[in-house]
Image (spheres, coloured by chain):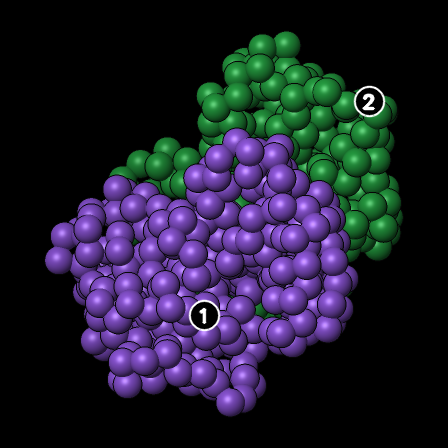
Chain colours: A purple, B green
Amino acid sequence: MGAFKMRGATNAILNLSEEKKAKGVVTHSSGNFAQALSLAAKSLDVPAYIVMPDSASEVKKSAVRTYEGKITECPSTLQDREATANKIQKETGATFVHPSNDLDVILGQGTAAIELLQDYPDLDYIICPVGGGGLIAGTALTVKHFGNNCKCIGAEPIEVDDAWRSLQSGKIETNETANTIADGLKTQLGDKNFPIILENVDEIIRVSEEEIKAALKLIWERMKIVVEPSSAVPLAAIIKEKHRFQNKRIGIIISGGNVDLSKLPF
Amino acid sequence: MGAFKMRGATNAILNLSEEKKAKGVVTHSSGNFAQALSLAAKSLDVPAYIVMPDSASEVKKSAVRTYEGKITECPSTLQDREATANKIQKETGATFVHPSNDLDVILGQGTAAIELLQDYPDLDYIICPVGGGGLIAGTALTVKHFGNNCKCIGAEPIEVDDAWRSLQSGKIETNETANTIADGLKTQLGDKNFPIILENVDEIIRVSEEEIKAALKLIWERMKIVVEPSSAVPLAAIIKEKHRFQNKRIGIIISGGNVDLSKLPF
């Protein structure tokens, strides 16, 4: 479905007992994890209940429906989403799977970087976007355990630099505003992924909205991949600090192509 | 560079003598072949001279320049383009490589279908877009020589159905108008590829502009690949005749992502 969240969702479901699998899984997400959990569940013949904000675009809802996720809409506040997911858990017995703050999800997402290092064992850096923290936590674990002097660097929009500030302060910071085109990266870190990030991510590079848009356009035009703005943030970070990265072997985690084609920034 | 024309261009250059390679190659193209020949030549350390219509978009010119093709602009008529390419041949000694009507180009392009059949030996159909005829001629040769009862079907916009009419009449037909979004398929067949197509292509399916746009959107949204409208024509043909293709094993040749992101049809 276009994002490595598919791996986290699949791993989380595979780790459930048969009894729990039969009752299904539930999550709240408007983005890639909604599609990932739906498709992973469908592939494993497990019901998936997806709580989506009523403001989510028709494109995103339609993708979830295609993957046979059962959508429940609710107001877009975190409280409403959590309450709705709780209610579904109670009614159906489904297991809640958090999009990023779940160890099985984190480990599943880390497998993308394992395959990258299998193909290119001598990477100097793997650069990964930072949003809710699941993908980078898995990536960072992989880099430390399977890399050969490789460093894991996070990339984040300046407009939502909560993870950058969290690494400075040593506690989970939040964003007061979220004026970024990279809407997959607006979420904050969680108590399960933050300790992993704190210990294993070497640095976070922050980029501007203009830098994100330029990298996005480059990926679309030259790599011919439909990526969402969040996925272009690592390339934007490399281009921003290109002198430092010259002659280095760099892997980039590109994940997520959730875009509304009628609202492109080009 | 996003199109299988890269294979044809590479094969054509590799078949030149060292002496000819040193003098370079020349072609006239505004599309994927311009980029393909430039990048193939750059990779093989050979000069590439590209004749482009002065009406070509800046995006296309910029891609050719990135791949170090030396651009000469001229008016967009076929006569002007051929005259300009001739002049460059005389001045530089470069070898002319036609984008589609060249046996080495045709054979190079056929290697995409060879790899597809290596991965999926029991395909019932391989469906390929028809423009100048190079890609489908190579694909059809592959299907007949390496397929296992596989059929090669062409897909073409109704608005420029010269190849469909050529198969009916047994001679190369032309288009009087070219009102299609699939601008890579406006060209006509050539004397080298037409006999191959006539002998080895089983059928051509024609699709409407609306069918092309719907298939294009589906590829962008679900496969997350930036393809140009021409590349969506085979999927449009399958969707159009979906009952007939039900439960069949179908390979599709998707080639070319030459799009101006500021002028998308979505």
Locate residue B244, reporting x and y percent.
82, 22
Q: Chain of mark 1?
A: A
Tell me if label 2 and label 1 are in contact, CB under 8 Å.
no
Circle 2 residues within 10 Å: few <14, some 14–19, many ≥20: few
Locate residue A26, reporting x and y percent.
61, 52
Tell me, for residue B32, which label it has, or none: none
Question: What amino acid type should be assigned to the residue bearing mark 1?
Answer: Gly
Locate residue A9, reporting x and y percent.
50, 48
Residue labelled with disc 2:
B244
Residue positioned 34% across, 56% down in the render: A138
Residue positioned 61% across, 66% down in the render: A82
Corner quadrant of residue B73: bottom right
In the image, farthest residue toward the front: A90
Q: Report how far apart the C-alphas of labels 2 and 1 lie in the structure.
A: 45 Å
Instruction: Describe residue A264's horizontal placement relative to residue B20 as left or right.
Output: right
Residue positioned 71% across, 26% down in the render: B153
Tell me, for residue A131, which label it has, or none: 1
Instruction: Describe residue A31's horizontal placement relative to residue B160 as left or right.
Output: left
Circle 1 residues within 10 Å: few <14, some 14–19, many ≥20: many
Respond whether the residues carrying marks 2 and 1 are from the same subunit: no
Label 2, secondary structure: give it.
Answer: helix
- B147 and B33: which is toward the camera: B147
Question: What amino acid type should be assigned to the residue bearing mark 2?
Answer: Arg
Q: Chain of mark 2?
A: B
Instruction: Describe residue B220's horizontal placement relative to residue A155 as left or right.
Output: right
Name the mark nearer the viewer: 2 or 1: 1
Corner quadrant of residue A28: bottom right
Whether residue B146 is visible to the viewer of this picture, yes or no, is yes
On screen, residue B174 above or below B147: below
On screen, residue A224 above or below B166: below
In the image, farthest residue toward the left: A149
Label 1, secondary structure: give it.
Answer: loop
